[in-house]
Image (cartoon, rainbow, N blue to C red):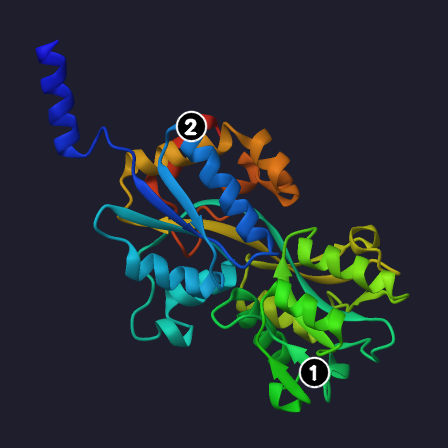
Amino acid sequence: MLRALLVLSVLLGLGLAQKPRVVIATGGVGGVYFYYGTALAEIWNKAGAAEAQAIQTAASIDNLLLLENRTGGGTYYCATVLPDSAYLAYTGGHERFKDKPAKSVRILFAMYPNYLHVVTREGAGIRVLQDLKGKRVSTGAPGSGTEVEALLVLQAAGISPKDFAKQERLGAQESANALAEGTIDAFFWSGGLPTGAITELAAALARKGQRLHLVPIDPRSTVAQTFQRRFPGLAGTGVIPKGVYGTRADTPTLTFWNLFVCHASLPEEAAYALTKATFENLPALRQAVAAAKDTALENAVRFVGGTIPYHEGALRYFREAGAIK
């Protein structure tokens, strides 16, 4: 007994028998990131892989800053992020990271695809991106991946926020509320399908005899081609089916595979345990978050060998699981 206690004491002293303290930076309430991160924290806690908690944030850029600046003292930040935001932060291409690129970012796994939503209502006179000129538009919360994408889309389309009658910078839920109340005409949102705030907005508009409309982005357009050139392998195109939000037609748009990332200092054993707990509990994750249907081994490793490295602990699990050689 005494020998066992001495061994345990040594392990605790080395930090090997302690669960890592992990904070998952997510996004705003109403977006998929928040619910995904909350579900993941619960799974990790139940599996004994970590002492985890999820926190609400402004999403991607905010999350990457937290990961870089707050990890330490035995607490490790992980985060849900858009791949284009992560790429810009890692390479120093975003203004918040130009002096200090986020070289500590490591991928644990790819999660699910985000779809760019340009949300309005029928009758607002917005059928194409150029119709946003002279309108009241929210480009996403400050520090969010949505804001990054919105501004890049507008630039590619030859539009400036100065062309708007008014620019707002609101998160998903706040944007949806503002559109329902008629204080904005349209908003950008990058999220999984379905995004709860937009589902609720569609229902609220229907009660008023109105209908949600999503502005299409043709895969052959200059906007789509610009993104695919700038973020090779990260940006693609897809379709939001009309049944998701009750729109009149399917909507072509841009897609981006979300990444779940952590800090490079997260111990290899911890990264291995977190990844293992995630993929051994996919039914629970998928039950909690509809978009998690695309969280799967074959999708998780889609960026292996890309610009941003995977954490070695995650790679070890994926090798054992047969997802990579």
Identify the residue at image location x=49%, y=40%: 40
Q: Farthest residue in the top direction?
A: 1
Q: Nearer the viewer, residue 238 or 1?
A: 1
Q: Nearer the viewer, residue 303 or 194?
A: 194
Identify the residue at image location x=23%, y=46%: 74
Tell me the residue that label 1 is attached to. 136
Identify which amino acid the numbered label 1 is placed on: Arg
Q: Is residue 286 above or below residue 115?
A: above
Tell me the residue that label 2 is attached to. 47
In the picture provided, is 124 more to the left or to the right than 73?
right
In the picture provided, is 306 more to the left or to the right than 175?
left
> In which image quadrant can residue 66 be found?
bottom left
Query: In this rendering, does residue 58 appear at all?
Result: yes
- Residue 108 is situated, as x and y percent measured from the top left of the image, at 42, 44
- Per the image, label 2 sits on a secondary structure element best described as helix
In the picture provided, is 132 more to the left or to the right than 257?
right
- Residue 238 is situated, as x and y percent measured from the top left of the image, at 71, 56
Q: Earlier in the sequence, mark 2 or mark 1?
A: 2
Please give the label number shown on residue 195.
none
> In which image quadrant can residue 105 be found?
bottom left
